[in-house]
Amino acid sequence: MKARVHITLKSGVLDPQGRAVRNALTSLGFDGIDDVRQGKYLELDLTESDAERARAAVESMCARLLANTVIEDYQIELEEA
Amino acid sequence: MRAAVVTFPGSNRDVDVIDALIAVSGQRPGIVWHRDVELPDVDLIVLPGGFSYGDYLRSGAMAARSPILREVSARAEAGVAVLGICNGFQILTEVGLLPGVLMANRNLKFVCRDIHLKVERADTPFTGRYEAGQVIRVPVAHHDGNYFSDADTLARIESEGRVAFRYCTPEGHVEDEINPNGSINGIAGVYNEARNVLGLMPHPEDHVDGAQGCSDGRPMFESLIEHLA
């Protein structure tokens, strides 16, 4: 089973990198961008085949290492291998 | 005072703090490797500055999950003094011994220069040789020093008097214009609830001898010796 994990900054947390990317896009002539938020994306190949157990395991991985929940949220997508 | 310095792959201020401890205490600290699972019987544990594990994932995130940190946490909870400097501060927040998080500097630049700090209180093991409200000059050298916590946590650490140092002007005014990294409320260092754990971004260990141009960091180590001897 494959797990795709998106880690994003919580709303309200300043994202200076996202803002720099927005400014660079604007300077390239891409108009109409209100905001850019930069995050992280991880793919995990799991031996677990049960979706419920896989989700529980990845939840625990996010809470204990992959995300810092003081400033970050995470979303998990599972896909049959 | 018996001290141990924990080193990780990517630590680079470990020798600075070892030298500072020798200069001030006359005793060589023990050196503990990140893969070790036991600490010697010590009064002070130091997590030094650097870029442990190349700052992979987040600054301090990997080091916080290394075997030795379980033992550091157990000792901290038993009351042993723990000092985390720069990357050491990042590790202490990642492992949950200190609240909040160190984010990328607000201007996305690595900042490396002397700054001024206001000592918030002088009744802790780390600051007994300072005066409350005293201004000291020490260097900073970091990219991820922007202290942040949610509003409830911030209110709690402020009301409990757990801010150790704030960035300030040479006259002691905490102003946003001189804040080197965007830290909330100008926070440069925080204590745990029991005040035996201190994390700070600046480097007091690099200002312990007049030959370094300033010795404003020396009283921190003298305070620890006085308190722990």
Image (cartoon, coloured by chain):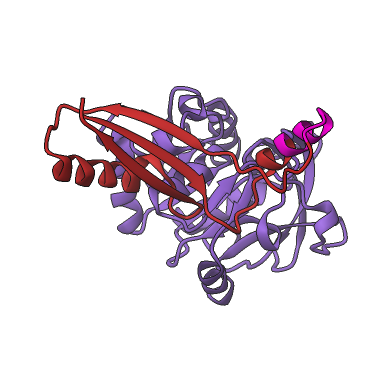
> Residue B114 falls in which quadrant of the image?
top right
| Secondary structure mainly formed by the magenta segment | helix
Residue B222 part of the magenta segment:
no
Question: Which chain is red in the rendering?
Answer: A
Which percent across, then down, holds residue A75?
Answer: 38, 46
Residue A26 drawn in magenta: yes
Left or right: residue B95 compared with residue A37? left
| Front in this rendered view, residue B94 or A16 | A16
Residue at 57% over, 47% down: B102
The segment highlighted magenta reads A21-30
In the depicted structure, whether residue B79 falls above or below residue B57: below
Q: Is residue A15 above or below residue B100?
A: above
| Residue B82 showing in the rendered view | yes
Asked if residue B108 shows in the view, the reply is no
Q: Nearer the viewer, residue A6 or B17?
A: A6
Place of residue B20 in the rendered image (x, y in percent of width and height, measured from the top left):
60, 35
Q: Residue at x 37, y 54 (%)?
A: B80
Residue at x 59% of width, y 56% of height: B148
Chain letter, colour purple: B
